[in-house]
Image (cartoon, rainbow, N blue to C red):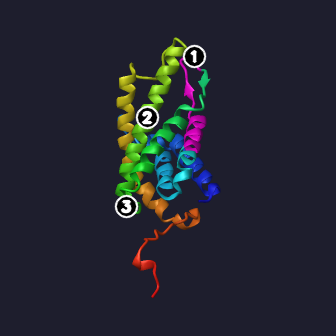
Amino acid sequence: MRWSVYAVAILIAASLDASVGSLFAVGELRGQFLPAVVVFALLAAPRKLGVRIAMLGGLVADLLSPVVLPTQEVLIVPGPRALGFALGALAVIQLRSLLYRQNPLAGSAATFVFSLLAAVAFVFIFSIRSLVLDGGAPWWPGSGAGEVWRRFLGAIGDGILALPTLWLLGKTRSIWAFTTATRVSPGLARQSG
């Protein structure tokens, strides 16, 4: 896998999420491009790189999506999305042997699972942070459960938006330089007579 292509893809996806992402919102249902790009790489890259790929995407998401507090201060916390993306990556890596990787519907389902697990980890980390710092998360609608519900709807939106995104990324597969391994089966098939 070419890391430079991946880096450019996640930067483009994160900038699209920040700039035109609200155009794809229907009420609370809001999809993002970045999870689809990360899942596309996870479905084709070697297993040993999976968590690193996802954490890089999560770090970019952490750095490019700051929270504006009611006091107009900007809060940038690197780590919650990176750890959430790592959890989502662990699930997608396990699921990818069950999925037909070239099918956008399978990729869309994997994106939903990835986004849902990343959201649960994000809410858990910020809940722990609010307990440690004796403060709340002022951007949440009320409780952690309300935020999980909002992020569940976001995961559905990510899965829907993943359909065209994964189809488009599939057309660029040649520039990513993914390696494909073939399985060698033992037995008579390998013996030459």
- The segment highlighted magenta reads 55-72
Q: Earlier in the sequence, mark 1 or mark 2?
A: 1
Q: Which residue is mark 2?
A: 119
Q: Residue at x 58, y 64 (%)?
A: 177
Q: Which residue is mark 1?
A: 71
Mark 3 neighbour class, 10 Å CA radius: few under 14, some 14 to 19, many 20 or more = few
| Residue type beneath disc 3 | Tyr
- Image quadrant containing the C terminus: bottom left
Q: Nearer the viewer, residue 1 or 13?
A: 1
Mark 1 neighbour class, 10 Å CA radius: few under 14, some 14 to 19, many 20 or more = few
Q: Residue at x 49, y 26 (%)?
A: 125
| Residue type beneath disc 1 | Thr
Mark 2 neighbour class, 10 Å CA radius: few under 14, some 14 to 19, many 20 or more = many
Q: Is residue 101 left or right of residue 71?
A: left
Look at the numbered disc 2 and give the secondary structure of its residue: helix
Q: Which residue is mark 3?
A: 100
Look at the numbered disc 3 and give the secondary structure of its residue: loop
| Residue type beneath disc 2 | Ala
